[in-house]
Image (cartoon, rainbow, N blue to C red):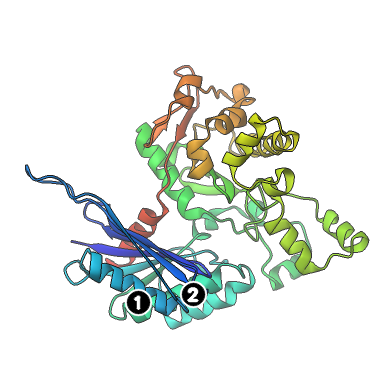
Amino acid sequence: MSVVLVVNSGSSSFKYQLMDMDAETVLASGLVERIGEESGRSTHTVFAAPSDGPAPTMLDATYTRELPIPDHTAGFAVMLEAFAQNGPSLAERPPIAVGHRVVHGGARFFEPTLITRLVEINIAELAVLAPLHNPANLAGIEAAKQAFPDVPHVAVFDTAFHQTLPRAAYTYAIDEDLAEQYRIRRYGFHGTSHKFVSERAAEFVGRPLAELKQIVFHLGNGASATAVDGGRSVETSMGLTPLEGLVMGTRSGDIDPAALFHLARRAGMSIDELDDLLNKRSGLLGLSGYSDYRDIRAAIERGEDRAVLAFEVYVHRLRSYAGSYIAQMGGVDVISFTAGVGENAPVVRAAALETLGFAGVEVDPERNATPARGIRVISSDASRVTVLVVPTNEELEIARQTLAVVEV
């Protein structure tokens, strides 16, 4: 059995999945959170094994603990205890590798990479481009290497899929020397999800990936859109950081940079205050008072004008990017929606595509409104463009890429 442990580490938490890669199934998953706080929390879920005979299938079980977790190293010790006490046994199913999500690989990392000391140094240096993410990713790597010192560790970068962007797509129109000195360009994010969804969509429609022009909308609290032409990212909405692009839960997305100069001069706001404004107090939250789309829908039903406007601004931006990408690729064959909002908000999907009839896009209202968990078609039979809902699985994609590195 080829078992891979996938780790996604944040500043005060980390998620993990233990995956059987022979069957591509999850054996266990968990979340260690509130790291560094007075009381931490560990949640560990063991998933049911399929039954091969008349015996009943073991039920899924979740185990929770509350205890102090001072740092990531202590968090990994808690995770190991959860495996030892609740299963599956890591002695019986030891991971052959650990795959790590790393948000920013800059222009240095084009593919999943075996983690060495030099790679760790590079991840740390790139923290200037992702100060909220790379240091946390690195803390998880260091703790995981202590917990699993005898297996290879692999970094899978959110930015790697977008390394195929053409120069015209990733270059900002600012002073060339300054941009090169400070590495200012579009990098793009959510690449692991966009790669998984675009490949899964091609498989589902039964056409070669190399023949398809696709648009993928990854719509969660963070949101991004990517144009995928022949399996290659050719345009994406996030830029130097995950702030650019679509309207998000708390992030503004696109905004005239001069608005920041205006706020600095007229409101006396500092760089840190502006950073906090655009990343934590803008987007849907800034427009409506709610960052969660479900709360916005409830507010719309109550007749709150701010929520209505937030929805309209959100959808307006989606349409703008869809139209732009169709123009850049010269058409589109498949449009996919994924992540929390993309998979579960039929009103958003319908509104985002409502004006794209000129491009051959036609959503079937009944298919779109029907709840389902798996990949599914929501376009009409008459639509020239196939519209899909594709549940993303970034952990599986990370595990696949990790396995590909260690099996070479």
Q: Which secondary structure, mark 2?
A: helix
Residue 216 shows in this picture: no
Q: What residue sits right under mark 2 in the picture?
A: 138
Residue 220's mark? Answer: none
Residue 273 placement, left or right of 44: right
Residue at the outermost right position: 266
Foreground pick, 286 / 119 = 286
Circle 2 residues within 10 Å: few <14, some 14–19, many ≥20? many
Percent of width and height locating residue 340: 50, 44
Q: Is residue 65 above or below residue 362?
A: below
Residue that badge 1 annotates: 77
Amino acid on which disc 2 is placed? Leu
Q: Are marks 1 and 2 in contact (CB under 8 Å)?
A: no
Which residue sits furthest left? 54
The earlier-in-sequence mark between 1 and 2 is 1
Residue in the image at 35% along x and 77% along y: 77
* Secondary structure of residue under mark 1: helix
Count of numbered marks: 2
